[in-house]
Amino acid sequence: MVEHIWLFSGYAGSGKDTAAQLLVPLLGDFNATIGSFAGAVKDEVAALHGIPRHLLDSQQGKAQFHESGLTYRQLLIEHAEGEKKRTQNPSIWATRIQAPPTSHWILSDWRFLDELLHIRFRFPKAAIHTVRITRPSVHPSNSYTEHELDSAIFDTVLDNSGSLLHLTKQIQMMLETLQIPLMVSTSKESK
């Protein structure tokens, strides 16, 4: 049962996925799972447009152009918004994700307030931790998908302008502040 939900927010390229990957072993490899709101969007866009799914998981892949003249990122945004309008449900993508059987669930692509509201409604007993990842060298696009949470108040802000070690230490401090014990984990690959 999910006890803690971690919502990571930040501009594209800020290091949300990296921070999520650093958090997992600190919580225990078998105790934490990384997920995303955009997983279903990526699955649908890949199927509709014949795009290899793995290309939609990286900044470089999403920057590629489709034969329509749009980048893969633009196709993702258009599809996501089209489904929100078609279904008249601003939380449509939050409704399509499935909670893992671990106590910590890290959603590494939080972009919209509606997603937070839906998660709070769906998991009223879970502790929800909002985390903003900042990286001064990243210059966001003008897309509203990058800016809806700009004025939000986050539980924690992590500065990703240094080394991985610096980011890891900030994550450890976040866990200590929240009184969540650090776990000694064993890599899944070694089992």
Image (cartoon, rainbow, N blue to C red):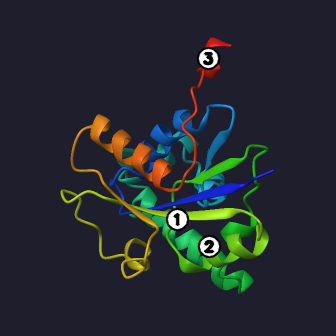
Q: CA distance from mark 3 to mark 2?
A: 32 Å
Q: CA distance from mark 2 to mark 1?
A: 7 Å
Mark carried by residue 28: none
Query: Reading the chain from its start, which is encountered first: label 2 or label 1?
Result: 1
Quadrant of the rendered structure where residue 71 is? bottom left
Comparing 181 with 44, the one in front is 181
Classify mark 1: residues with Cα within 10 Å, few (<14), some (14-19) or many (20+).
many
Asked if the residues shown at circle 3 and circle 1 are in contact, with their CB atoms under 8 angstroms apart, the answer is no
Position in image of residue 87 (x %, y %): 74, 82
Q: Report the residue marked by disc 2.
A: 115
Callout 1, which amino acid? Trp
Comparing 183 with 79, the one in front is 183
Query: Reading the chain from its start, which is encountered first: label 3 or label 1?
Result: 1
Position in image of residue 185 (x %, y %): 59, 25
Which residue does the image show at 68% across and 68% down from the upper left? 94
Q: Is residue 145 above or below residue 48?
A: below
Quadrant of the rendered structure where residue 67 is? bottom left
Asked if the residues shown at circle 3 and circle 2 are in contact, with their CB atoms under 8 angstroms apart, the answer is no
Position in image of residue 125 (x %, y %): 77, 66
Outermost residue, left side = 137
Callout 2, which amino acid? Glu
- SS under mark 2: helix
Q: CA distance from mark 3 to mark 1?
A: 28 Å
Q: Report the residue marked by disc 1.
A: 110
Asked if the residues shown at circle 2 and circle 1 are in contact, with their CB atoms under 8 angstroms apart, the answer is yes
Classify mark 3: residues with Cα within 10 Å, few (<14), some (14-19) or many (20+).
few
Q: Report the residue marked by disc 3.
A: 189
Q: Is there any visible trace of residue 67 in the rendered image? A: no
Which residue does the image show at 45% across and 38% down from the upper left? 22
Q: Is residue 112 above or below residue 27?
A: below
Callout 3, which amino acid? Glu
